[in-house]
Image: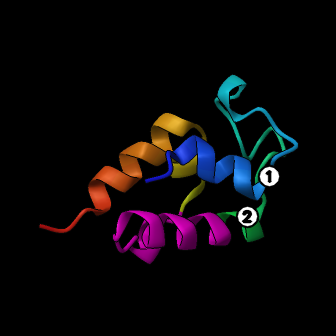
Amino acid sequence: MKSVLEILNGIRPEFDFSTSQAFIADGMLDSFDLLTLVSELEAEYGIRIDGQAIVPENFVSIEAIEGLVRKSVRP
């Protein structure tokens, strides 16, 4: 299973996501990237991310994205 960092690097390999805590503000992810990321996270982890959870604060850092993944796991 790929890590969140591996997925991010697959989407935007030109950025070092391990050094930022503001992916959107730093211009590392745009709205298209977010949709791609959500799709890849859902496929990789077998989860469903609620549309209401697709807000910038859930995508500012690796930790925030990992938290979103954890919250999206269905029992």
Name the chief secondary structure element in magenta: helix
Q: Disc 2 designates what residue?
A: 33
Quarter of the view holding residue 50? bottom left
How far is mark 2 from mark 1, CA to CA? Answer: 8 Å
The range drawn in magenta is 35-54
Residue 40: where, in percent of width, then height? 56, 68
Amino acid beneath label 2: Asp
Amino acid beneath label 1: Arg
Vertical placement of 68 versus 53: above or below? above
Q: Disc 1 designates what residue?
A: 12
- The image shows a total of numbered marks equal to 2
Q: Is residue 41 magenta?
A: yes
Contact (CB < 8 A) between labels 2 and 1?
A: yes
Residue 53: where, in percent of width, then height? 43, 64
Residue 44: where, in percent of width, then height? 45, 65
- Residue sitting at x 71%, y 47%: 9
Residue furthest to the left in view is 75
Vertical placement of 49 versus 70: above or below? below
Q: Tag 2's secondary structure?
A: helix
Q: Is residue 22 left or right of residue 26?
A: left
- Residue sitting at x 71%, y 41%: 23
Please state which of the two labelled residues, at mark 2 or mark 1, is closer to the viewer: 1
User: In the depicted view, which residue is nearer to us: 21 or 3?
Assistant: 3
- Residue sitting at x 47%, y 41%: 64
Q: Is residue 43 left or right of residue 31?
A: left
Q: Tag 1's secondary structure?
A: loop
Residue furthest to the top in view is 19
User: In the depicted view, which residue is nearer to us: 30 or 75?
Assistant: 75
